[in-house]
Amino acid sequence: MTPPPPPPPARKQVLLRLDPAVYEALARWAGDELRSANAQIEFLLRRALAEAGRLPGGAAPIARRGRPPKSSGDPEGPAADG
């Protein structure tokens, strides 16, 4: 039996002060892409870091959007008969 995977590292919390108009534009953009404002900020920062060649190789990928997939043992999962 394999040991359980280690827990993911804690996420760094950062206080960010933005001009209210900039935040409103960011929140609208995030809503258009079905993301939270926080997820949109992280997405944009990662894209800027990658374009500048500064995204660390050890950075964990952004979590996928939406609900996590149901486990195969979940009785409420998709039926086997289709």
Image (tube, rainbow, N blue to C red):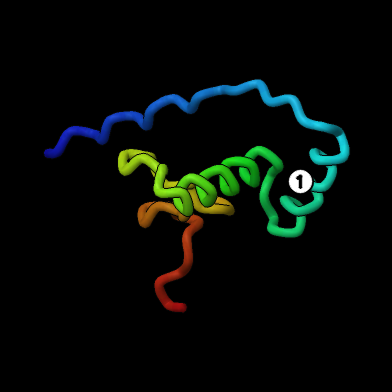
Residue 36 shown left or right of residue 44 in the figure: right
Vertically, is 33 above or below 3?
A: below
Q: 66 or 80: nearer the eye?
A: 66
**Three-letter amino acid code at disc 1?**
Leu
Q: Of all residues shown, which one is farthest toward the left?
A: 1
Q: Of all residues shown, which one is farthest toward the right?
A: 21
Vertically, is 20 above or below 55?
A: above
Residue 20 in percent (x, y) is at 86, 34
Residue 54 in percent (x, y) is at 41, 43
Task: Determine whether the residue tagged by mark 1 lies in a helix, strand or loop.
Answer: helix
Q: Residue 68: in sight, yes or no? A: no
Q: 62 or 26: nearer the eye?
A: 26
Residue in the image at 24% along x and 34% along y: 4
Residue 39 in percent (x, y) is at 62, 43
Residue linked to disc 1: 26
Vertically, is 79 above or below 49?
A: below
Residue in the image at 56% along x and 53% along y: 65
Q: Residue 71: in sight, yes or no? A: yes
Total number of numbered discs in the rendering: 1
Residue 22 shown left or right of residue 60 in the figure: right
Residue 64 in percent (x, y) is at 50, 52
Residue in the image at 56% along x and 22% along y: 13
Quarter that holds the N terminus: top left
Residue 64 shown left or right of residue 22 in the figure: left
Q: 73 or 1: nearer the eye?
A: 1
Residue in the image at 40% along x and 49% along y: 53
- The answer to which image quadrant residue 59 occupies is top left
